[in-house]
Image (cartoon, rainbow, N blue to C red):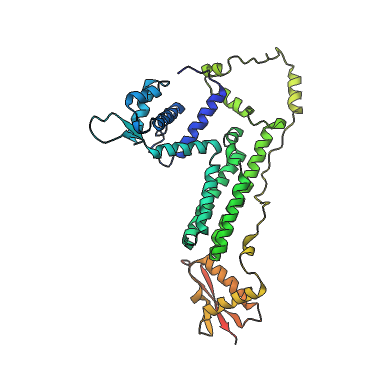
Amino acid sequence: MSEQPLTLDAVLTDEAVLSTYRRMFAALARDSGAVVDDPALVDIAETLFAAFAEAGEEWLTHEQMRFVCRAYPSDQFDNRLRVLKGLGAIREVFPKPNQLRYRASFTSVVGLMFIRRMMDDGGQSEMHRLLALEDLNVADPRTTMEEARQSAVNLARAFRLWALELITLTTGTIEELREQAPKLWGTEEIARRAQGLHGTILTRWPELDRVCTDLRAAIYAYSDASRRAAGRLADSAGTTRNLTLLPTETWRTFSQTASKERLAAVLDGVLFDAPAPWHDPAAIARAVDEAPRPAPAQPTPPRSHLPDPGPSGSLDSSPGAAMERLRSVAESLLGDSSRVALADVLGPDWPSARRLLADLTTVDLRPELPFRLTWSDELTVDPGREPAWLSHGWLERTS
């Protein structure tokens, strides 16, 4: 393989490839050295899989595999072939002694295709596919409420982690933000599809309103973080809006960390203006004093500009429906009794108990409903419960 001249762009591209592989397989790696540290090793695997696809039912021998990978050094090819055999990506056609022909694993080929898509757009296409599949699942009549709940919880977790990563990019270095720029593509479409999925879940299962609220908050946090990151990325490009130009931070980091040999190889042929032989100290001090000092960027509060229709489109919010719901809550608690203690109907789950107390307080404030709340001066304190204190009250039927 011919030696290509080393450039800063090539170094950054190789590092971006390896960082994608490391993040993809971090959860499956046995240790930090389990992922390749040379992009050429991945190229060897792709070359072999392409050769297997063209060979068809003839398959490939060891000599044929070495021939198609002749552009790579022998030690790299032998190392890669040994790893691929050990992990089952390449195996014998038939498990018998003296087998000379090998076949490739379909799973490994699909895995490489998936990784390439992740490298191209940072996972955007995979998120579109996931949202499309989840939309089909929740619309399926056979889908249960528990499956829809799990789907909403998983999506909310993914959007929150995505939003946190974008927030970190907004406040981090511009090099990392440019490297992860594909994660900012198509964010409005992803948010729109996620809101449609949220509306489908809430329409079919109104009982999942709390889970849907968490999902909607995660979607809005992701949208707000993506807009802030995109704004900073556009500002860093300058008036030309050319995102392919290397920022000053990249040059500064490279010049501070690279060895003399690597720095000389990258900057070979680049002509710099020679510095002036002498600068007046007074002129330097005056230039420093007069230099503009950019004000630090103040992060905006996490407010979303997206519309929030909420459950109004799927739930009946008329006054009559609200009164009927309050009556139903009170009747379900009283049953055949005319009086029931609140301590007996409040469960150990404080969020649920808080919502029930809010409904009962609304019932008490409605004179047209035949129910009232009465309270005593007694107060019970139990540090083991939640809440730790309890006022004694009763729900009574007035007629």
Q: Nearer the viewer, residue 243 or 343?
A: 243
Nearest the viewer among 64 and 334 is 64
Q: Quadrant of residue 281?
A: top right
Residue 281 lies, with reference to residue 392, above or below; the image says above
Say above or below: 313 vs 123.
below
Residue at left offset 62%, top offset 63%:
311
Pick the residue in front: 278 or 26.
26
Relative vertical location of residue 321 with respect to residue 72 in this rendering, above or below:
below
Q: Judge left or right: residue 228 versus residue 356.
A: right
Asked whether residue 157 is in view, the answer is no
**Image coords of residue 34 (percent x, y):** 39, 34
Q: Residue at x 67, y 30 (%)?
A: 242
Quarter holding the N terminus is top left
Residue at (37% x, 28% y) in the render? 80
- Residue that lies at the very extreme toward the left in this rendered image: 97
368 left or right of 43 in image: right
Res. 284 in view: yes
User: What x and y, as percent, mark residue 32?
Assistant: 41, 35
Residue sitting farthest toward the bottom: 399
Residue 288 is left or right of residue 331, and the answer is: right
Q: Whole-percent x and y of residue 21?
A: 46, 35
52 shown above or below 231: above
